[in-house]
Amino acid sequence: MGDAALSGELRCSFMSQAGAATMLVAAGDVGSKVPAEAIVAAGGTVMRVSQPGGFNAMLKGATFTGEGAKVRIALTGPAKGGGESPARPGTLRYERDGRELAEVRGDWVCGP
């Protein structure tokens, strides 16, 4: 997933705490009106989704949609550690056709 062909200068990713699997990789441009793009592996499928607002719109969580699915990243606590791109705890909720299929705890990391 880290090698996914996504447009954008900066990336975010969500990694589950259980098994440390990367579940979502997103990319977007700073200050852009072009949607951020993401690849998500959830609910037994891998799909491409997007969110308006580019990279800046992903920093405090995100809601991606596409192919009848909605993926919400909600932050649940402060950054862990320091540096330019510290991990923040959060949850990833995956919905398809209005039904929640998965909720996973993990870390949301955004930056270069």
Image (cartoon, rainbow, N blue to C red):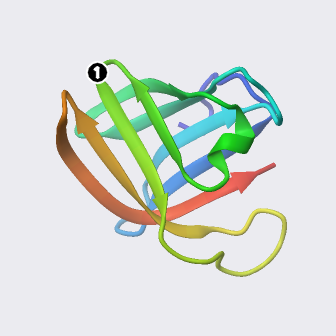
Q: Is residue 53 above or below residue 102?
A: above
The residue wearing badge 1 is: 68
Q: Amino acid at mark 1?
A: Gly
Q: Is residue 64 left or right of residue 84?
A: left
Image spot of residue 36 (x, y percent): 63, 29
Outermost residue toward the bottom in this view: 81
Quick one: 43 or 88, which is closer to the camera? 88
- The residue shown at (19%, 33%) is 98
Image spot of residue 31 (x, y percent): 83, 34
Image spot of residue 77 (x, y percent): 54, 76
Does dot 1 land on a helix, a strand or a loop?
Answer: loop
Q: Is residue 3 left or right of residue 70?
A: right
- The residue shown at (41%, 69%) is 17
Badge 1, how many Cα within 10 Å: few under 14, some, many 20+? few
Image quadrant of residue 38?
Answer: top right
Q: Is residue 33 above or below residue 56?
A: above
- The residue shown at (56%, 40%) is 25
Image quadrant of residue 53?
Answer: top right
